[in-house]
Image: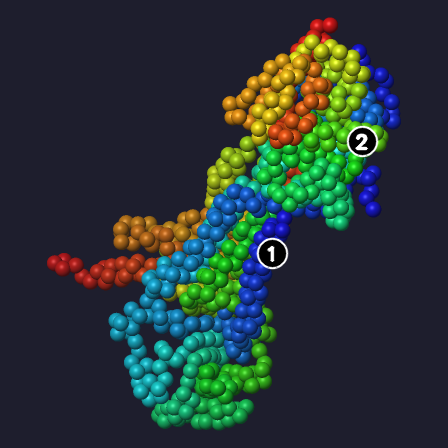
């Protein structure tokens, strides 16, 4: 019986050690103050934020998607110019970008937080000699560069903190508020319990993600043409209360979109509409052998009042889609 | 002779018109008897219903009809009576990976003792059956005799008032056979109710004079073993024994007038002896058995079967 | 002081049966085979890491692979199989080995015997499966592109689901074990035929165990077209309640049947 006890103790030790390590990783992880995928730094976003987008730039740049984009000459020329002037290469030096906004206030409330490694001196010089009307002032003891100060659309850029790894950009009031919050250690976004609730539902670790409440979706059309319908038949879209998106670019292009409807019936209705479109697309795709994989790429499920759309598109399929489009667009010779 | 006296309420074991059948097969038929303190031999050939009788006593089976009471309570569905009951089952079955000590301690824990008491009682039981030296060996590595003794040890370790022993000396060497017989007799003298099932009359005779004869599911006779013993003189008794050097036993016994025949097994370890006087045979066997290293001994029951046929015919 | 007028109390007697049973269960050929089966994901994880180390293209990320292993390997196949082989044998092994007599002739209630043996089954299977799950998690969650801390809640949740899987299937198969003489074939049919109903649309999946269990695995593999469309996700709270009720109901029934049944051991 001693050896049985030994086995139980050994097994419990492995599990206990594993759990302790896991807990340790969780406690010591800088992301402990994070809310879902939003890092702690992102909590300086304004309380009235309606949507937040996050991009893991390093994973994005390393993805086959971006590599292909860059190899086809899609890399912005501004990147090279920026690097020449400031030594700053966004592909190399930026780790994460957070974009927050309020659609109802337009650009007035927009704020972008960039986390990376910046040469503060060179970047400041580049801003000051950039040719735009820029003024510099101190806010919370921190330099703040304001573009078109005093005008309606005045924007600003500022480093958050003394170490040069966080940069805030956006409307002047938003940047000033972010700097204030950062220095005071405030987390205004936490007051937005609805958005925080949505953020907590998003699993961290995605290459890109987005959450938004109903104000983001208020701009969306309330009806869409029925799939395969004729005579302009319209399908009424049930109202969505929230939207969550996560995406990966490796090993395949994958996208998970979760929408919260008002109730289960709304979710079911929305799912049916989306399934209809998916089925129609699958039907069309099934006639083209090279697009056969498309059939399995998209799926729609419901869970109480939520609708989840999952798309996993292999790059081969993306490539198959591209030349086809080109061929379809080009005129048939001899016609 | 098969009709039992009226059940006395204070008796440890009571059968009141108890029957038990397995499907269409009747294993025990309308048995009424009481077993008083002391040693009672349950005698009958294989398939007579002895095991069913013991299983009914031990609450392992419910009577199909009638009643079986153990220490004043229904034997079936009264787990509390097993504080005072010990059973040595006939099958040679164990949790083979346990050591002898672990086996006893595990079962004593099930009897409600704390760890210290379990250890003390287990050691005491091991001493009683002379297995202290083998206490830390796995039962899977025990000889047949040792397995039989550890089975007896688990039945007596909690010092029960009622002891049910199914073929307890089967497979024991002469020395341990004597040890177990002495133990059973001692327990009987101490006022315990001991029921010993056997298909060998001489085995039972060595233990007690009170027997219950079972045949074809019925209690054929109850009473003094001598009455039956007298009937057996004309029937030869067969004993099979296993020894390191069976020829030593054969040499010692070959001149005995009561030995009718001797046969050696093909493997050179077994010797089968037919004797007309079992008492004299067992008396003469003791010393040569030790010298020859006898490890197992049993008696086929063909002879008893013929006695029962004879009794039934009478 | 022992009270000989009543059976030994439930907990001490169940603990004693547990102690007696654990040794036989852990050190058996069954444990060797099923331990190997349950540890296969560790090998898969190591091979995955070696493939990554050799800079060969990996089809899925470490966390994706871990999700597959939890949902498809352990919860859907390996643990139910382990439960089938152990739990159906809780009493059957004692009957076959003719050792049940020793347990039934002690002053303990039969409910305590079954509970003790069930506890031994749970501990044995947990000893075989949880370390494998933890090691697999660490091998895969420390691979490229996976944030360890972010995945920790998954580990905790998965370990809980593994325990629930063993409990609910164990209770079901314990019931089948005391109910039937040969429960293995019906058990296999249940696992690999009946449980397929979980993939049907409508209410039918609610009559399976796997549909409730998989609803608790949050990082189930990403959808594969039509099958995902039908792969219903039931509410997590309700799933927990249903699985708990099923476990208790199956065990209660098993105990009830075992308590009333006679065991005629062949000699």
What mark, if any, has residue C85 been given in the picture?
none
- Across and down, in percent, residue A272 comes to 45, 52
**Quarter occupied by residue A318:** bottom left
Compared across the picture, whether B309 is left or right of C29 comes to right
Q: Which residue is mark 2?
A: B186
Q: Is residue C90 above or below residue B39?
A: below
Q: Is residue B273 above or below residue A247?
A: above
Compared across the picture, whether B280 is left or right of C85 comes to right
Q: Are marks 1 and 2 in contact (CB under 8 Å)?
A: no
- How far apart in space, not on screen, are marks 1 and 2 (Cα)? 45 Å
Chain identity of mark 2: B
Q: Residue at 47% of width from left, 82% of height from top?
A: A166
Is disc 2 placed on a helix, strand or loop? helix
Compared across the picture, whether B70 is left or right of A284 comes to right
Q: Is residue A285 above or below residue B99?
A: below
Q: Which residue is mark 1?
A: A9
Q: Residue at 74% of width from left, 38% of height from top?
A: B128
Taking depth in this image into account, of B64 and A105 the one nearest to the observer is B64
Quick check: can you spot residue B191?
Answer: yes
């Amino acid at each position: 019986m001693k050896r049985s006890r030994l086995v139980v103790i050994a097994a419990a030790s492995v599990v206990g050690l594993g759990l302790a390590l896991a807990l340790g990783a969780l406690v010591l992880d800088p992301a402990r103050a994070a809310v879902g995928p939003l890092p702690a730094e992102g909590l300086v976003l304004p309380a009235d934020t309606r949507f937040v987008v996050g991009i893991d730039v390093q994973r994005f740049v390393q993805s086959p998607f971006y590599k292909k984009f860059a190899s086809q000459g899609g890399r912005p020329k501004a990147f090279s110019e920026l690097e020449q002037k400031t030594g700053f290469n966004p592909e190399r030096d930026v780790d994460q970008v957070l974009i927050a906004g309020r659609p109802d206030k337009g650009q007035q409330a927009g704020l972008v937080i960039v986390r990376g490694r910046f040469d503060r001196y060179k970047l400041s010089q580049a801003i000051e000699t950039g040719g735009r009307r820029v003024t510099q002032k101190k806010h919370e003891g921190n330099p703040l560069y304001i573009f078109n100060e005093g005008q309606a659309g005045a924007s600003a850029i500022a480093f958050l903190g003394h170490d040069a790894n966080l940069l805030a950009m956006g409307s002047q009031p938003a940047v000033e508020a972010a700097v204030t919050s950062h220095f005071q250690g405030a987390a205004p976004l936490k007051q937005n319990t609805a958005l925080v609730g949505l953020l907590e539902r998003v699993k961290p670790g995605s290459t890109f993600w987005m959450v938004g409440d109903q104000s983001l979706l208020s701009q969306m059309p309330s009806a869409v043409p029925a799939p395969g319908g004729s005579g302009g038949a319209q399908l009424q879209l049930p109202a969505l209360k929230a939207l969550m998106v996560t995406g990966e670019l490796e090993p395949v292009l994958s996208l998970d979109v979760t929408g919260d409807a008002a109730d289960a019936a709304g979710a079911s209705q929305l799912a049916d509409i989306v399934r209809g479109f998916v089925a129609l697309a699958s039907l069309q795709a099934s006639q083209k052998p090279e697009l056969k994989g498309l059939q399995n790429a998209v799926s729609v499920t419901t869970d109480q009042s939520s609708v989840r759309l999952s798309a996993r598109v292999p790059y081969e399929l993306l490539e198959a889609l591209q030349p086809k489009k080109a061929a379809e667009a080009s005129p048939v010779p001899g016609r | 002779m098969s009709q039992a006296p009226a059940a006395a309420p204070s008796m440890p074991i009571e059968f009141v018109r108890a029957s038990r059948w397995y499907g269409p097969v009747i294993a025990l038929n309308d048995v009424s008897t009481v077993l008083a303190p002391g040693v009672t031999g349950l005698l009958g050939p294989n398939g007579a219903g002895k095991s069913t009788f013991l299983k009914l006593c031990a609450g392992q089976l419910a009577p199909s009809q009638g009643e079986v009471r153990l220490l004043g309570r229904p034997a079936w569905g009264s787990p509390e009576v097993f504080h005072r009951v010990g059973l040595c089952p006939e099958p040679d079955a164990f949790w083979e990976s346990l050591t002898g000590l672990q086996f006893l301690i595990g079962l004593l824990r099930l009897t409600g003792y704390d760890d210290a008491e379990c250890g003390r009682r287990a050691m005491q039981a091991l001493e009683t059956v002379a297995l202290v030296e083998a206490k830390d060996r796995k039962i899977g590595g025990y000889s047949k005799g040792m397995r039989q003794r550890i089975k007896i040890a688990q039945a007596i370790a909690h010092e029960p008032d009622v002891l049910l022993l199914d073929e307890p000396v089967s497979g024991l060497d002469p020395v341990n056979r004597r040890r177990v017989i002495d133990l059973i007799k001692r327990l009987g003298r101490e006022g315990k109710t001991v029921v010993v099932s056997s298909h060998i009359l001489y085995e039972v005779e060595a233990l007690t004079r009170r027997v219950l004869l079972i045949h074809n599911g019925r209690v054929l006779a109850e009473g003094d073993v001598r009455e039956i013993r007298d009937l057996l003189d004309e029937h030869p008794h067969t004993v099979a024994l296993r020894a390191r050097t069976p020829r030593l036993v054969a040499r010692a016994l070959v001149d005995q007038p009561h030995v009718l025949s001797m046969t050696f097994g093909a493997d050179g370890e077994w010797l089968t002896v037919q004797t007309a006087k079992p008492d004299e045979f067992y008396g003469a066997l003791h010393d040569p058995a030790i010298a020859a290293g006898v490890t197992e001994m049993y008696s086929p029951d063909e002879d008893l079967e013929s006695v029962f046929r004879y009794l039934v015919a009478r | 002081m022992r009270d000989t007028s009543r059976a030994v109390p439930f907990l001490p007697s169940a603990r004693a049966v547990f102690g007696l049973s654990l040794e036989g269960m852990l050190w058996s050929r069954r444990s060797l085979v099923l331990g190997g089966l349950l540890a296969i994901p560790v090998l898969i994880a190591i091979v995955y890491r070696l493939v990554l180390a050799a800079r060969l293209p990996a089809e899925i990320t470490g966390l994706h692979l871990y999700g597959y292993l939890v949902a498809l390997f352990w919860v859907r196949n390996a643990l139910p199989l382990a439960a089938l082989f152990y739990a159906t044998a809780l009493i059957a092994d004692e009957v076959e080995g003719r050792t049940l007599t020793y347990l039934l002739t002690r002053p303990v209630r039969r409910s305590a015997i079954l509970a003790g043996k069930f506890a031994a089954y749970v501990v044995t299977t947990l000893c075989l499966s949880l370390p494998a799950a933890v090691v697999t998690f660490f091998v895969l969650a420390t691979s490229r592109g996976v944030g360890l801390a972010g995945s920790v809640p998954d580990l905790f949740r998965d370990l809980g689901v593994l325990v629930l899987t063993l409990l609910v299937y164990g209770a079901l198969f314990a019931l089948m074990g005391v109910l039937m003489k040969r429960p293995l074939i019906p058990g296999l049919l249940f696992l690999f035929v009946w449980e397929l109903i979980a993939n049907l649309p409508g209410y039918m999946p609610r009559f399976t165990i796997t549909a409730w269990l998989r609803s608790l695995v949050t990082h189930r593999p990403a959808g594969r077209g039509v099958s995902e469309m039908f792969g219903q996700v039931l509410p997590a709270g309700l799933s927990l309640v249903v699985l708990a009720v099923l476990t208790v109901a199956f065990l209660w029934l098993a105990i009830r049947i075992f308590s009333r049944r006679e065991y005629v051991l062949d000699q």
